[in-house]
Amino acid sequence: MGNRLSKISTKTGDKGETGLGDGSRISKTSTRINVIGEVDEVNSWVGVLASELDAQNPHQAILSQIQHDLFDLGGELCVPGYKALAPNMLEDLENTLVEINEALPPLKDFILPGGNKAASYCHMARTVCRRAERSIVALANEEQEIGNEISALSVQYLNRLSDFFFVLARSIAREDGGQEVLWKSRHTVSKKG
């Protein structure tokens, strides 16, 4: 993993293939490349979210760590068989999720994405993360069929990360006296009984 990019425009992908970290080439439409792209998209949304928050915001440190973790996950996916995620990464994320959630009131209603711009960005990160999670499960199933393995930790990390973004969105929406946006159905549902 010590290679550095000295030339960005290589033209080697002009025919619809791209190179993996192990030197092999695969289609840009492969499930593996889709997952790598979706993890990169989550990372980009985390960057957008972090840029919306004040530099002194206490969430900046965990967002920075998540970006590094996601880059590690991308590296893991780019080199089949390589492991970059470690159990402590998941534990740290879970601990932070629990800490933020404990400071929130119990959730009694569904909430809508929104509240303020930063909370909305959290929800964007959450939904893209869920998509990446579904794609990595599809990749794991494909790889298992041919005798390869995708780390269970990578699936767990994305699952927990989407939960984290949901809880963080709730917290950020409530900062500075703000409110979460509660869902209100236009239809009354009656229970039979």
Image: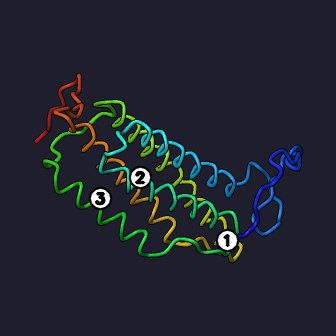
Q: Earlier in the sequence, mark 1 or mark 3?
A: 3
29 lies above or below 96: above
Residue toward you, 50 or 124: 50
Residue under the point 75% across and 61% down: 4
Q: Secondary structure at mark 1?
A: helix
Residue count near mark 1 (Cα–Cα under 10 Å), binned few <14, some 14–19, many ≥20: few
Query: As shown in the figure, which amino acid type bears the numbered disc 3?
Result: Leu
Residue corresponding to mark 3: 97
- State if disc 3 and disc 2 touch (CB < 8 Å): no
Residue under the point 73% across and 69% down: 2
Image quadrant assignment for residue 164: bottom left
Q: Earlier in the sequence, mark 2 or mark 1?
A: 2
Q: Secondary structure at mark 3?
A: helix
Q: Secondary structure at mark 2?
A: helix
16 lies above or below 81: above
66 lies above or below 151: above
Q: Is residue 89 left or right of residue 26?
A: left
Q: Label 1 to label 3, Cα distance in Å?
A: 34 Å
Viewer-side label of 1, 3: 3
Query: As shown in the figure, which amino acid type bears the numbered disc 2?
Result: Leu
Specify the label residue 131 is tagged with: none
Q: What is the basis of the colouring in this image?
A: rainbow
Residue toward you, 31 or 1: 1
- Residue 115 image position (x, y, % from top left): 28, 31
Residue corresponding to mark 1: 145
Residue under the point 42% across and 40% down: 49
Query: As shown in the figure, which amino acid type bears the numbered disc 1?
Result: Glu
Q: Label 2 to label 1, Cα distance in Å?
A: 35 Å
